[in-house]
Amino acid sequence: MDYRNIFESAMNEARETAHLPDDDRFIRIVKERTSKMEKKNFRFRKSVVIAASIAAVAAMTVSVGAATNWDIASLFAGANADRHGIPDTWYQREFREYYKNEYFTDTVVSSDTEYDILKAISTEVDREFDVNGHKVHIFGYAYDGNRLDVMYDVICDEGTDTLEETTPFGSIIPSVPDDSYDLRSVEYDLLTAPGKYIAGIDLRIPEDTGTVRLNIVDSADKAEAIRKGASYEADNYIDIALNRDNVYSYRSETETKICDDFTVTNLSITPFMIRIEGRSLESVRALDLPILAVFSDGSVIDLHRKGSVACEHEFYSLYVTHGVLLDAREITELRIGDTVIRINQ
Amino acid sequence: MSDIELESCVRRYRNTVFGTALCFVKNPSDADDIAQEVFIKLYKYDGEFDSDEHIRAWLIRCTVNLSKSLLRSYWHKFSAPLEEAENKVYYDKSVDADMLKLLNKLRPKIRSVLYLHYYEGYSAAEIAGILKISESAVMARLSRGRKQLRTLLLEERNESENGLQEYI
């Protein structure tokens, strides 16, 4: 099937039916509209500065409390206590026997190392938001220049087991609005049952932005209105200060066959979570594999699958959390089943 | 950006921008409005581009952002184009818009990935970079899109054949 021809036909049809202006006319329109906008911007520049000042004051009034439910702060202090030596049989013997020779590949794979400085991290956000009757309780966040991970609970409205397929409840807005920033709007797809989750948002925040605001809204329309300058609703946001902590996160593209039916294609490690993306033909068994993080001193931490498994066709994103905040630089290996992925070498 | 550079970019990339926008908003008039917004941003842009490919990718990224914003806007959700209401003002009914209709049955995120890959010639990795999604997600959408398009074409063909038989 020639997909290009299909698009070519559709494009031709669209052009023919819509009577679009020719290129010369189009260029004139662009120039005229730009000129009008520049005049308008000059007139309103002063009021934009005032609005930005108000936003900065509002940011200072946000209250944060100690994390309660997951108690991440105390886990952070005790991270080393959770490490232990690699046992001879580091996962259940029955499990190993069952899969041995049939699925495991016993390979060691090196992965190119790529680190990002973590630009924002907090484990002490303790804020609850009402989203269409559901409660979204946010505990913390970590941002590394590419991705914002937010740790949250979802407590569904009574009588509901799962949320709607798409429940938009987040929108990133810089503290100083400027339409030249290429900021993505953010909508979480919550394909979740009630429980504790870590969700990632892909976004790039300009280097010179000191604070960004994670708005929690219950509809995409509200997010859009706020992005266009509508006032913030009371207590519907969290301010994220980019403080450039000296902690690292790790990203890598890889093509690592874990077993016959599971291949990892992307890995990322932040202090909150490890995200494993891959292709799986028979997902359930492959994703049940035990996962260990191995540190430079030889100790390990068992990773528990507290996060969500998002799948699209045969592709899976597996979020695993470790219950402690980790410095990615210390992790040298990730073991998924019997496959060892070397990270820091 | 200078006037000459803008003109050059419009002539080279307007088609790409229009096509990308059309993947999201369906309506050609909306797609052309978005294309204007995108080139206004380019005209005002102070930064530098490394290459033609950089400009093209920047324009596509910008188009995707603006298209998504339009889709989310209240006005877009609760209004219909005048030409649809009157059914004839801008649309030339003599043109058979079969392929456009067919593609519009796909979800925008699927349609856009298919378009970037098969029409613009981007690889899965490049699309992942432009759309800021993972490569595996791109490949999944490509796979799903191909399957859905095949099914739609098959249905279309069957309907045409049935229609022809009834006519005979």
Image: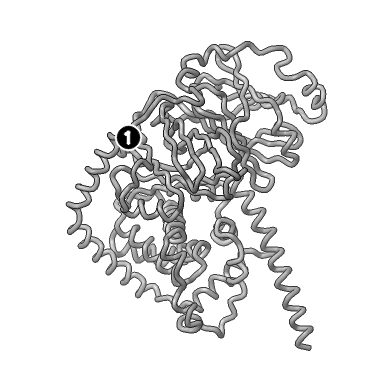
Tell me the residue at 57%/71% (across/down).
Answer: A10
**Secondary structure beneath label 1:** loop
Give the percent coordinates (x, y) of residue A181: 34, 48
Residue on which the image places disc 1: A62
Figure quadrant of residue B98: bottom right
Of all chains, the one bearing label 1 is: A
Camera-side residue: A315 or B15?
A315
Quarter of the image where the N terminus of chain A is located:
bottom right
Tell me the residue at 80%/21% (across/down).
Answer: A94
**Image height of A334 relative to A81, above or below:** below
* Residue A226 appears in the rendering: yes
Quarter of the image where the C terminus of chain A is located:
top right
Q: How is the image coloured?
A: one colour
Give the percent coordinates (x, y) of residue A85: 63, 11
**Image height of A6 relative to A237, above or below:** below
**Image height of A203 relative to B21, above or below:** above
Residue lying farthest to the bottom in this orientation: B168
Give the percent coordinates (x, y) of residue A337: 71, 26
Tell me the residue at 42%/53% (across/down).
Answer: B58
Give the percent coordinates (x, y) of residue A200: 50, 38
Left or right for B6, reference A219: left
* Residue B52 appears in the rendering: no
